Amino acid sequence: MASMLWSCVTDFFTYETTKSVVVKSWSVGIVNRIVQLLIIIYFVGWVFIHEKAYQVIDTGIESAVMTKVKGFGYHDNQTMDVADYVSPPQGAAVFCIITKLIVTKNQHQGRCAETHGLYKCDTDVDCQRKFGANLGNGAITGVCLKSSNNGTCEIQGWCPTENDQVKRKPMLDVKNFTIFIKNSIRFPLFDVTRGNFPQHMTREQIKSCKYHPVDNPLCPIFLVGDVLNYTGQDVASLAEEGGEIGINIEWKCNLDFDIEKCQPKYSFTRLDAPFAKNKISKGYNFRFAKYFKHENGIEYRTLHKAIAIRFDIMVTGNAGKFNTIPTLINLVAAFTSVGLGTVLCDIILLNFLKGADQYKAKKFEEVSKAQIEESLAQKQGSQLSITPAMKCSYDSGALSLSPEQAV
Amino acid sequence: MASMLWSCVTDFFTYETTKSVVVKSWSVGIVNRIVQLLIIIYFVGWVFIHEKAYQVIDTGIESAVMTKVKGFGYHDNQTMDVADYVSPPQGAAVFCIITKLIVTKNQHQGRCAETHGLYKCDTDVDCQRKFGANLGNGAITGVCLKSSNNGTCEIQGWCPTENDQVKRKPMLDVKNFTIFIKNSIRFPLFDVTRGNFPQHMTREQIKSCKYHPVDNPLCPIFLVGDVLNYTGQDVASLAEEGGEIGINIEWKCNLDFDIEKCQPKYSFTRLDAPFAKNKISKGYNFRFAKYFKHENGIEYRTLHKAIAIRFDIMVTGNAGKFNTIPTLINLVAAFTSVGLGTVLCDIILLNFLKGADQYKAKKFEEVSKAQIEESLAQKQGSQLSITPAMKCSYDSGALSLSPEQAV
Amino acid sequence: MASMLWSCVTDFFTYETTKSVVVKSWSVGIVNRIVQLLIIIYFVGWVFIHEKAYQVIDTGIESAVMTKVKGFGYHDNQTMDVADYVSPPQGAAVFCIITKLIVTKNQHQGRCAETHGLYKCDTDVDCQRKFGANLGNGAITGVCLKSSNNGTCEIQGWCPTENDQVKRKPMLDVKNFTIFIKNSIRFPLFDVTRGNFPQHMTREQIKSCKYHPVDNPLCPIFLVGDVLNYTGQDVASLAEEGGEIGINIEWKCNLDFDIEKCQPKYSFTRLDAPFAKNKISKGYNFRFAKYFKHENGIEYRTLHKAIAIRFDIMVTGNAGKFNTIPTLINLVAAFTSVGLGTVLCDIILLNFLKGADQYKAKKFEEVSKAQIEESLAQKQGSQLSITPAMKCSYDSGALSLSPEQAV
């Protein structure tokens, strides 16, 4: 029994390697090495160096954005400051700079004539057809008010109604406003925190700089006029109609290098560009009201239709760092791919080369059933008297599952 | 020396391929081909066609959302328009439609009785125990006000205090409001920009359409009543208590096909659903104040407890496009997997088949130490006089590292 | 012809396996098994168990956050409640708690002297140099107002101008405020929805609990003082200067286990930390105005410079679940890697072991061109009269592409 066990152990500690045929032929040899070289170049050059397949990538960037607008504009006989034209005021990642205000003062609850052109009428029936319409300035009462030759439907709501066809000059001073952006990000996978301007910038440097894509790409202060120019937009038409501008802060960090090289890259786009062809809801506007009270307690309001440029600061990015898992998987893929070159060479060797049949005979050793049966017959004849060979088998890494063999 | 170098070069341009044993046995042959077929079907059908493992996926979708609500409601003897019930007004991706307002008018700073039921008292000590409580309408002063038989604690803050137990009919007209959603997205990896409605839709088509999951899945105008229905919610109870509705815009784009097929898919959920069992802070509400001033300069305010339906428009998605790296890695995995079929077949061949030992003898060529030593002894005897063979070795792609060999 | 077809079929259903050399040498055998063991341990322990390479990961978490602040503070002789100090009021994921207000009352449009220190002047020219400056309280008119010995530039805008150098005690009560966070998330890939507190928590449990990282990690109510402490910040200086605090909710879910174990983990950071060295725009503040009207219709405003603590609730996370594709790819990588151990052992066997040349002779079977040509010559001599063997070839899985063979 002890010797049986010993034999098992020695059988286990053997080394199995494939038997190879070495073909000394220039043609296949050169093809073989060239294919291998191409595969290695591909993996080293493209997969590893260019696409950095040895890195694990963190795409779950965490970001906090703080913004501050500065500047003074002149609109409708008033000087507008930040508290007047920035909405909402908290300095979040999405904010609007109001460039035009259509103001409807002293609105009280009541009934009055609709100003919207859609609501012309001759009789009450014309108005009753429009019950529930959403496009006017109030709920349709179903009465047609005929002041003169032209009648308009009566609405219930805030009166007098807004007339947004009024012409008003937009606040073009917006192009001189500055936006200060403070963006701190974190890559949770690597626990790396970064800010959007370098730590060595002093308070004075920051206060005096202006962002420029080439000369000053890390300055966090942006001139609105520049931003609009970078998106290829015309300041005047944008101030007139409103619009949505995207400021994209892109962080692409290779954390295998110095972390100081992990810097933001800014880009600017017009966000409503995909809708340019539809010509619906051109620009950007919203309505809000300021509420006042008479001394007698009656509330009234001033309605504002604000035409604004909305800025969406979007932070995207990813960080890569060396990691063993992708490296290993790609290395194995690379090694195995080098081996796949054999497939091509085998095709050449066994089919197209002079003497292909001879190569085939060398490479392949046929075992037919007939042979095995013959050999079995012989063996049975000669070995019947011999005790079955005790052996452990670990061939090909495959466990031998048959119980007979283990006996 | 020149001939040595030449021999090195010829040695390098050789081709090495494994020597194979071809077993002409129906049983293993069929198993082999079936296993290979299954593996190929799995890879082609599932990995490549279904899971698109040949694509690189961009999950870092950039998105900007603009919303606009339209409609008129009637609440507390007032007609409410957008400026009254949408908060915040800027038309961002998260906005609330106020459906019920509990208004506490004319609040001035001062001291008064708490209305909240928790603050009943008999003596000042009862109130002093509640110093620092956060749930009432103001800071507890520690005084118990006994107007009649029932006492309540005095608070310092805005007086009179809010009584939010007041019954008030919610604004059910909310179900007829419409939400217009403009969503532009970008996949930064592929620099692809898309909008949520097709470019061929005209202004009139958009203005007149209503979203329907089957009939009109690309219309960007949603009826609030429909949205609430899709989430399985009751409009009346939602308007009464408030709630949070998620409108999910999902972009799943296969950029290997026509980009026009890259379209959004909308889905609607009630966001507070995971908290349904807790019964805490049912619904959704928030408080805000409008500030007024008397002519004498004293400030007062109107407190609003706004019960609202909050809409969160969440944009998710990813885009896939053919890329060589995942394709190659998966192809190598597929090829190698096909080879793994051999493991199974080897187990069958070498263990279970009749004549397994014979197959084993054919497949494995044993080299024992004894053999090698014997051969070494012979060689040393016969080859001592011969100069060592100059050779370069590139066997198995492994560099020969031993300096002796290079000599 | 039928027999030819039959021969094709039998040729197809053969099984091809590599011929192996089994080396019965302790040294290489042990190295071989140890290398294999290390590779297996690495894959099982690190790749599969630790890094869960058998899972597909969903990183596109969808999240909705609802917040509610409670508490009363005392600032500038007023009791401040939620409607006074929370901005914006809707309870979104980003909100500010105002801790200090610098109030400039009764501002009317007009011209007045600048208060900002930068705008001292001797003559009008001093002021004209500053046209377009953004840092003051209004647009520079170019006039130098010399009231006494010191002159200041005149501005046009809201008068009187703000003096933000006023000393005012911040509202330190902020540390006793509580923040209630309701966060519901969804992993779209697996369609799993979760809330940030367990369903078995009752209304009373939630109302009475306070978050503690160890004792009560799932309570959704956070004491502001605690949150500021967790970030290592001093409440007093933060209330004085303002600041940005990040509350990170991290969801790391292993959906192969019980879904109840998919719970949030809270962490707290000071978001402006990366800018600590720059000393620019320390803290956090923003300006907003309340608008009032005189009975005669003239509008005036109260400007507020709000120094605030801004809370950004950021939700990140991912969920993993078993999936066949990554499992298979990694399994194949593992199996292939085990095979790669052979490369190392071959180097040892064929170069460093005693009898390396003998092993080499056993492993490699050389076929030189000379041999093939000789064999070809013989064959041609002997086989010229014989019809070419009809055969189908499926060797090495490679399709035989040569037309001659198919003949």
Image: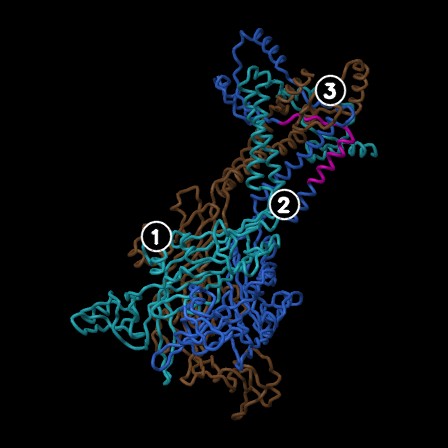
Chain colours: A blue, B cyan, C brown
Q: Which residue is mark 3?
A: B381
Q: Is residue C105 visible?
A: yes
Distance from the alpha carbon under mark 2 to that under mark 1:
44 Å
**Above or below, C285 relative to A36:** below
Q: Residue at x 51, y 65 (%)?
A: A94
Q: Position of residue B174 (x, y in %)?
A: 40, 61
Disc 3: which chain?
B
- Residue A206 lies, with reference to residue A351, above or below; the image says below
Mark 2 and mark 3 in contact? Answer it, CB < 8 Å: no
The answer to whether A249 appears left or right of B222 in the picture is right
Q: Amino acid at mark 2?
A: Asn
Q: Are marks 2 and 1 in contact (CB under 8 Å)?
A: no
Kind of residue indicated by mark 1: Ala
Q: Is residue B345 above or below residue B238?
A: above
Cα gap from disc 1 to disc 3, whole angstroms? 91 Å
Q: Is A22 included in the stretch rendered in magenta?
A: yes
Q: Residues within 10 Å of mark 1 (few under 14, many from 20)?
A: some
Q: Which of the chains bears the disc numbered 2?
A: B
- Please tell me how many numbered marks the rendered image carries: 3
Which residue is labeled 1 in the image?
B276
Mark 2 packing: few (<14 Cα in 10 Å), some, or many (20+)? few
Residue C379, quarter of the rendered image: top right
Q: Secondary structure at mark 3?
A: helix
B210 or B347: nearer the viewer = B210
Residue C355 seen in render: no
Query: Magenta region: which residues?
Result: A17-39
In the drawing, does residue B175 fall left or right of residue B325? left
Indicate which disc, 1 or 3, sits on the residue closer to the N terminus. 1
The answer for which chain carries disc 1 is B
Q: Which residue is mark 2?
A: B323
Query: Residue A249 appears at what percent x and percent y?
Result: 57, 61
